[in-house]
Image: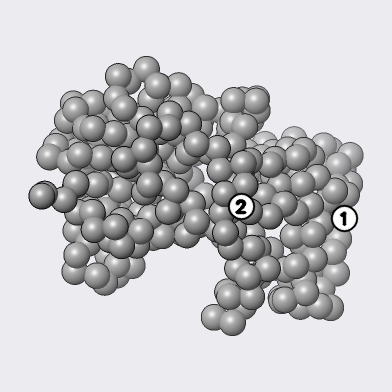
């Protein structure tokens, strides 16, 4: 029996590397797309086939999906403040994925799996959510068999806060009382790969445990730097500051607007993952 051939976009990210490992574990013919040859060192397993191409360039990915059974896209612009790339959420999350979708349609692949964002459809006034929602709508209209995966957040999104805690400072926008259940990338990757043979059109999926935003900060503080101070930034001040980010740096503005929004509401998806946030933080601190 021939292995199903899977093509993964967004393979170099924290989630992408976990999806790649899960594909290998389940004996799929694993193929990943990386933008630069310098990224090849991320993957050392000889069973991983690497294609160098930039999804933002239509010519570079022309016919890239030919011969594949399944396409998985975890492609998206990082919300990290350390990400200084000039490309926008519109260019990466929407236009880049639309380029992939057009090639997938041409190749008549069996399934397209896309990693979106939980409650994107309810927050389309924000660019981060709008681009995820807009692409999801296009995928639904594509005629392809699809699955749209919608996590509230992944654990690695809190990595910057770990770095901040080490310096003795942890910021909190608002009281931190709103709750969420982020999911470990490994747990999310297992769910994504399981959908290759699944029938879900949508899969809303979060971690097994629910935390307030303040509890997440306290866990980071406890395991990173117990002497770190949590500095509360009032919502009123953020509303005053945000317009200045628009003037200075539009990408930074959209990131800050996204962070400001999610800190002010509960985002609790169906609880599926296994790893706790405490276990994750302990693990990366040991490393």
Give me the C-alpha separation between circle 2 and circle 1.
Answer: 26 Å
**Is 268 drawn above or below residue 231 in the view shown?**
above
**SS under mark 2:** loop
Could you tell me residue 115's position as x and y percent? 45, 41
Q: Would you say 177 lies left or right of 19 here?
A: right
Q: Which residue carries the number 1 mark?
A: 232
Density class for disc 2 (Cα within 10 Å; few <14, some 14-19, many ≥20) is: many
The part of the image, by quadrant, that contains residue 105 is top left
Name the foreground residue: 229 vs 74.
74
Name the foreground residue: 190 vs 9.
190
| Residue found at the far bottom of this picture | 286
Q: Which residue carries the number 2 mark?
A: 207
Q: Earlier in the sequence, mark 2 or mark 1?
A: 2
Which residue is drawn at the image coordinates 48% and 45% (left, top)? 77
Which residue is drawn at the image coordinates 62% and 32% (left, top)? 119
The part of the image, by quadrant, that contains residue 61 is top left
Q: Is residue 25 visible?
A: yes
Q: Which mark is residue 167?
A: none
**Is 165 drawn above or below residue 247 in the view shown?**
below
Could you tell me residue 3's position as x and y percent? 16, 50
Which residue is drawn at the image coordinates 69% and 42% (left, top)? 268
Q: Is residue 99 visible?
A: no
**Is 24 drawn above or below residue 223 in the view shown?**
above
2 vs 1, front mark: 2
Could you tell me residue 213's position as x and y percent? 77, 53
């Amino acid at each position: 029996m021939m292995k199903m051939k899977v093509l993964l976009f967004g393979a170099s990210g924290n989630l992408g590397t976990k999806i790649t490992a899960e594909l290998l574990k389940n004996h799929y013919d694993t193929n990943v797309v990386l933008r630069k040859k310098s990224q090849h060192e991320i993957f050392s397993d000889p069973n991983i086939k690497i294609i160098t191409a930039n999804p933002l360039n239509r010519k570079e990915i022309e016919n890239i999906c030919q011969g594949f059974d399944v396409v998985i896209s975890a492609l998206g612009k990082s919300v990290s403040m350390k990400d200084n790339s000039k490309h926008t959420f519109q260019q990466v999350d929407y236009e880049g994925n639309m380029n992939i979708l057009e090639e997938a349609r041409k190749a008549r692949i069996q399934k397209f799996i896309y990693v979106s964002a939980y409650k994107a459809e309810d927050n389309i006034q924000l660019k981060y959510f709008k681009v995820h929602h807009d692409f999801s709508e296009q995928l639904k209209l594509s005629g392809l068999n699809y699955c749209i995966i919608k996590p509230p957040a992944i654990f690695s999104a809190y990595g910057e806060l770990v770095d901040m805690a080490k310096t003795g400072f942890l910021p909190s926008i608002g009281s931190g009382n709103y709750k969420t259940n982020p999911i470990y990338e490994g747990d999310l990757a297992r769910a994504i790969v399981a959908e290759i043979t699944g029938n879900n059109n949508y899969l809303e999926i979060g971690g097994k445990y629910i935390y307030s935003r303040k509890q997440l900060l306290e866990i980071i503080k406890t395991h990173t730097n117990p002497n770190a101070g949590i500095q509360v930034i009032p919502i009123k001040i953020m509303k005053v500051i945000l317009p200045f980010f628009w003037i200075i740096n539009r990408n930074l503005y959209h990131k800050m607007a996204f962070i400001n929004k999610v800190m002010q509401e509960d985002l609790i998806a169906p609880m599926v993952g296994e790893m706790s946030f405490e276990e994750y933080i302990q693990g990366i601190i040991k490393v």
